[in-house]
C-alpha cells in the first residue's frame, strides 16, 4: 500500500467517522450492518476486518455476536481511535499491509473490508491474501464504492463526488485534497463486473453483489 495514502489516512483519522456520516447521509451504518449479515457470523466465529479504520465493522459485529475479532489497518492513527473505542478490549488491533497479511493460511471464518480495494495498489493480491487466510467455506465480504453508471442521475452524482464532497472535506475536516482524492478514486475505480472477475480469478465462488446509493456503493460477498 502506498505510503502517501497511508499518511493521508493518518491525517484525516480524527474526522473520518464524521465525514462518512455526512457524505453518506448516515447510510454507511446500514451498509456495514449488511456486511455483517452477509458474513454469516455466529458466536465463536473468527472475524478479520481489513482496512478497519476506526473499527466500525468490528463494533457492529460485536453488537450481535461473541466473535473473535481482529481489526487490521495500515494507518496507526485510525487504529489508535479504534483502540480508544474498544474500552473492554473485545478485539485485537493490528497495523499491517493488506497485501501481506500476517496470518497463517485458513485462519478466519470471515474476512470483511470497507473501502479497501479502491486504495489497494494491487487488487488481485489483496483478494488473493484474503482467500489464503480464509477457512474453506469461509466468507469474504467487500464494501466499496463503484463508478456511477450511465443513467439520468450520473451528472448529479458526478457533481456531488467532484465538487460537493471535496468542499465538505474543506469545511468540516479542513482537508480539501484528501477528499478530492477519495472521490477521484471512486470515479476511476473498477466496475462491479470487473471486481467479480478478479474475485473469480482468486478462487472465490458464489459471488453475490448488492448495490446501494444509486449504484455508487457495492457489497461483494463470496465463499472460499
Image (cartoon, grey):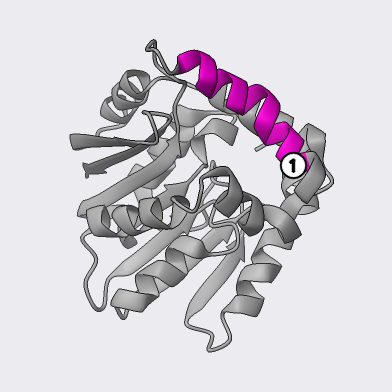
Q: What is the quadrant of residue 104 in the picture?
A: bottom left
Location of residue 135 in the rendering, given as x and y in whole percent from the top left corner: 25, 56
The reply to whether the magenta stretch includes residue 103 is no
Q: Which residues are magenta?
A: 154-169
State the residue at coordinates (43%, 43%). Answer: 129
Q: Which residue is mark 1?
A: 169
Location of residue 42 in the rendering, given as x and y in whole percent from the top left corner: 21, 72
- Out of 201 and 188, give the one closest to the viewer: 188
Q: Is residue 155 left or right of residue 32?
A: right
Vertical arrangement, residue 7 with respect to residue 21, above or below: above
- Out of 75 and 169, give the one closest to the viewer: 169
* Label 1, residues with CA under 10 Å away: few <14, some 14-19, many ≥20: many
Q: Is residue 44 left or right of residue 29?
A: left
Location of residue 116 in the rendering, given as x and y in whole percent from the top left corner: 52, 41
- Out of 128 and 31, give the one closest to the viewer: 31
Chief SS of the magenta region = helix
Would residue 105 be visible to someone looking at this image? no
The reply to whether the magenta stretch includes residue 166 is yes
Location of residue 154 in the rendering, given as x and y in whole percent from the top left corner: 46, 16
Amino acid at each position: 500500500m502506498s505510503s502517501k495514502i497511508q499518511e493521508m489516512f493518518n491525517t484525516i483519522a480524527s474526522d473520518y467517522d464524521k465525514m462518512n456520516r455526512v457524505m453518506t447521509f448516515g447510510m454507511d451504518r446500514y451498509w456495514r450492518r449488511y456486511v455483517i449479515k452477509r458474513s454469516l457470523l455466529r458466536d465463536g466465529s473468527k472475524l478479520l476486518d481489513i482496512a478497519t479504520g476506526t473499527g466500525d465493522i468490528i463494533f457492529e459485529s460485536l453488537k450481535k455476536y461473541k466473535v473473535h475479532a481482529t481489526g487490521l489497518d495500515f494507518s496507526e492513527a485510525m487504529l489508535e481511535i479504534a483502540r480508544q473505542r474498544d474500552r473492554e478490549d473485545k478485539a485485537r488491533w493490528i497495523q499491517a499491509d493488506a497485501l501481506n497479511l500476517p496470518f497463517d493460511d485458513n485462519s478466519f471464518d470471515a474476512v470483511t473490508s470497507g473501502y479497501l480495494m479502491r486504495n489497494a495498489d494491487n487488487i488481485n493480491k489483496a483478494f488473493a491474501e484474503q482467500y489464503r487466510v480464509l477457512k474453506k467455506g469461509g466468507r469474504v465480504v467487500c464494501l466499496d464504492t463503484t463508478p456511477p453508471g450511465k443513467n439520468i442521475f450520473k451528472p448529479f452524482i458526478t457533481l456531488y463526488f467532484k465538487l460537493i464532497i471535496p468542499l465538505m472535506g474543506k469545511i468540516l475536516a479542513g482537508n480539501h485534497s484528501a477528499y478530492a482524492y477519495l472521490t477521484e478514486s471512486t470515479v476511476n475505480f473498477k466496475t462491479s463486473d470487473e471486481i467479480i472477475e478478479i474475485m473469480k480469478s482468486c478462487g472465490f465462488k458464489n459471488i453475490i453483489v448488492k448495490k446501494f446509493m444509486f449504484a455508487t456503493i457495492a457489497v461483494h460477498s463470496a465463499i472460499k
